[in-house]
Image (cartoon, rainbow, N blue to C red):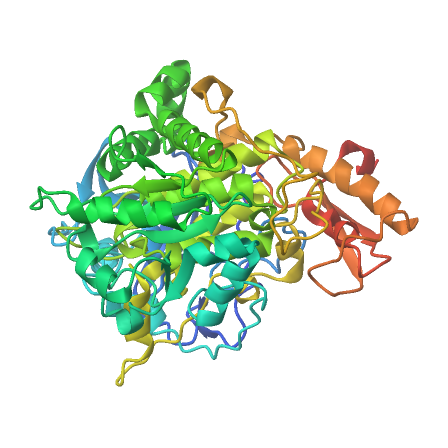
Amino acid sequence: MENKSSNNFISYVGLEEHELQTFSSSRRNSLVENSIKLLPGEVLIAEAQSVLMFLPVSDLKQGISGVLSVTNFKLTFVTSGDSNGENVTRQQNHLYGYTDTCLTNIDEIYIMIGDKKRKLVPGNTVPSKVKGIFIICKNLRTWSFSFKFSPVGHGKNLLTALLHHAFPSRHQLLFAYDYKEAYYSSLDKNVQLFRDISDWQNELKRTLCSDETKKGWRLSMVNAKFQLCPSLSQYVVVPASVTDSQLTDAARHFQGNRPPVWSWTSSHGAALVKMSELLPTITERMQENIMFENVRKSHPQKIPPVVIELNKEINVKLIAASFTKFINLCTPENIRQFWIQDNNFYSLLENTKWLKYISYCLQKTVEVCDHLNLGISVILQEGAARDLCCVISSLAQLLLDHHFRTIVGFQSLLQKEWVAGGHPFCDRLGHIVKTNSEKSPLFLLYLDCVWQLCQQYPTEFEFTETYLTTLWDAAHVSIFDTFIFNCERDRAVAAMDPNTPLVLRSVWDWREQFNDQDILLFYNPLFIPCSSTNKIKTENETIIKPLYAVSSLELWTQCYFRWIPTLEIRNGGQRHIELYIRLLQNDINQHGINESCISPIDKVGICSLHTNIDSFYPFSNNRSGNTVSAPIMNSSILLSESLLDAQSVITAID
C-alpha cells in the first residue's frame, strides 16, 4: 500500500496517452509552496494529499496520484510525474497550468456516492467522509477526483474550501482584487476600448463617410459620469435632432434608462440602432414614437426605420435552459454514459435547441443586413437591450464591415457592442452567486455564430477557431476586467476605489497569458486582407450572407469536445489542412512572392514545428513525440512564422 502522505505516481493502466502538463510555463515572479505555483497575491487555502485524478470520460480504472489544492484563484492538481515540459504541444498559459482550473470556471460540483452523484451548492453541509468529486466547468471540461487513499478529513476540508471560494457572494472576492502582479500594458494601440471620447470620434469618422450621414448623428456626453444610465458608456451617439434634455426625459420611460443609441452606419446612411423596450408600467407609446421619428430624421433621405423585436422567439432564460441540456450532452461522466449518448446523439442534440438558437441569431442578422444594404435603418429592440441586441448588432457589423473581421477590429467591436454596450458579463457568466441574477451563455452563443461564419467564409476572417476557443476560456479567468463586470460604471467605480483601487487589465493584452508562438495560432493563414481596413468598402469586397438553416450549421467540436479524448483524431483533422496551407504559404513567402502581409509579432528566429499533433490541437490531451525545426526567413511575414499551428504527414519523420 502506498504511503498516504507521499505524492507518488500510481498507474492502474498504462497512461501513455494522458501525461500531465508541466508547470514550466508558469508566470514569472511566481512563488512555490508545496510544489504549487502561486501568482503574486495568490494564497493556498486547502489541500488534500494522495488524491487520484482520473482521465476524463474514462472507466475510472486508471488514475494519477497527486496533491489537489484550492487557492484563492484556482483548483490545482500537482503530481510528482511532472517533467521539464519538453515537446508539449498544448497551449501554454502563463497564469495557470494544464491541470489547473480557475475557480470562476467551475460551474457545478458533485459529490460521488457509490455509483450516483449529488450536486452540492454553497451552504450545503459536506459529509465527514468524501470518497470522490466530479466537477463540470463552464468551458465544458470535467474533472474526476477520488480521495480513497487520502488521509482522513482531507477530502472534506478541500471540498468545503472549494464550495466556499468557487462561488463568491461579493465582487471584491474575485481574484482580480488580490492579484499583485505589476501591469505593464502591451495592448495593441489600434484596439479601441471605447472608454475615451477619442475612440468614439474615430469610429464616427470611420463610418460616417459623407457629409449627409455626419449631419444625422452626434456624440453626446449626456451620460457623463453615468448620470443618465449606469449600464451605458459615458459617451453615446444619438440622433442629431434630439437634445440632451429630451434624451434625459425620454430615458425615464425605457427599461434600464436606455434610450436608442447608435452602433453603425452603412455607406447609404442607413444606421444600426439599439433600443430598450418601454417600461411595463407605461402604456402610452408617445416617447417611443418620438425616438423612432428622430432615428428617421437621422437618415439622409429621411426613410423610416425598421424595428426588429428580438425577444419574441428567444430570450435569456430559453438560451440558459438550452445550454443546460447541451452541457449534459458534452460532459459525460464516464465512458459508459458517452456511448449511451452516442447511440442517439443527433436527436439529443436537436432536443437541446442550441443549434436552433444559433440559426435564429444568424437569420435575424441576415434580415438586419438586408435592410441596411437597401439603405433602410434598423432599430434592434429587446428588454434592456443588453443581451440579444449585443449578439445581433455585432454579428451584423461582422457581415457588413471588413474592418471588424481583423483581430484588432474584432476586439474593438466587442469592446464597443458588449463592454461599452453594457452586456452584464458578471451575471451572465455566473461569476458572483446572486439570487436574482440570470446566468446565460449569450457570449458563447455569439462566438459560436462567429465560428459558423468562419466555417462558411474561411478567407474572410483574420482570426482562427483557436482564437475564438481561447477567448471563451479567457472569459472565465477572474483577472481581466473585460469579463468580470456588468457595465462600464462598475469598472470605473472599481478602478477609482480610494481604499483598494482595481488595476484594469484588458483580456486583449494576450501576452499576459501567452507567448508569441501561441498568439500566432490566432492568425488565419487563409485570410485575405482588405486593401484598407480603416474605411468601409462596398466595392470589391465579399458580401457575407451566411446559410442559417440548422441543416447548414456544424458543431463547434474544438470548443465543446476537446476534453473528450475518445473523440480526438490522432495525427489528423482540420489542423493538418491548416499546416499544409501554412507550409505552402511559407514556401511562397521565402521566395519573395508575397510580401504584403505584415506580421503582428516582430520576431526572428527558429520556430519549432510540432509533429504528432491531434485534431484538438492546441488543446490536445497528448504530448508531442517529435519536433522538427523550421527556420523563419523573414520577420515581416506572418504566415511563415505560423508553422507551428499544425502538422501534416508530409513532414512526418520516417
Residue 114 drawn at (x, y percent) = 22, 33
Horizontal side of residue 1 vs 227, given as left or right: right
x%, y% of residue 396? 47, 40
Q: Is residue 429 above or below residue 41?
A: above
Task: Give me the residue at 25% from left, 39% from top.
Answer: 316
Q: Tell me the residue at 55%/49% (across/down).
A: 404
- Examine the rendering and report whether any part of residue 438 can be seen: no
Residue 654, how many percent across, how many down? 84, 35
Residue 309 visible in the snapshot:
yes
Q: Residue furthest front?
A: 301
Vertical order, 53 against 306 (above or below): below
Residue 523 placement (x, y as % from top left): 65, 49
Is residue 602 or residue 569 the one in the foreground? Answer: 602
* Rendering quarter of residue 232: bottom left
Number of callouts: 0
Quarter holding residue 538 = top right
Report the front residue among 308 and 520: 308
On screen, residue 97 versus residue 160, left or right, reads right
In terms of depth relative to the viewer, which is nearer, 9 or 377?
377
Q: Residue at x 39, y 38 (%)?
A: 445
Residue located 54% across and 41% down the image: 400
Relative height, residue 262 to residue 524 (above, below): below
Give the left or right position of residue 281, taking residue 155 as reference: left
Name the residue furthest bottom: 498
Q: Nearer the viewer, residue 173 or 441?
A: 441
Q: Residue furthest right?
A: 591
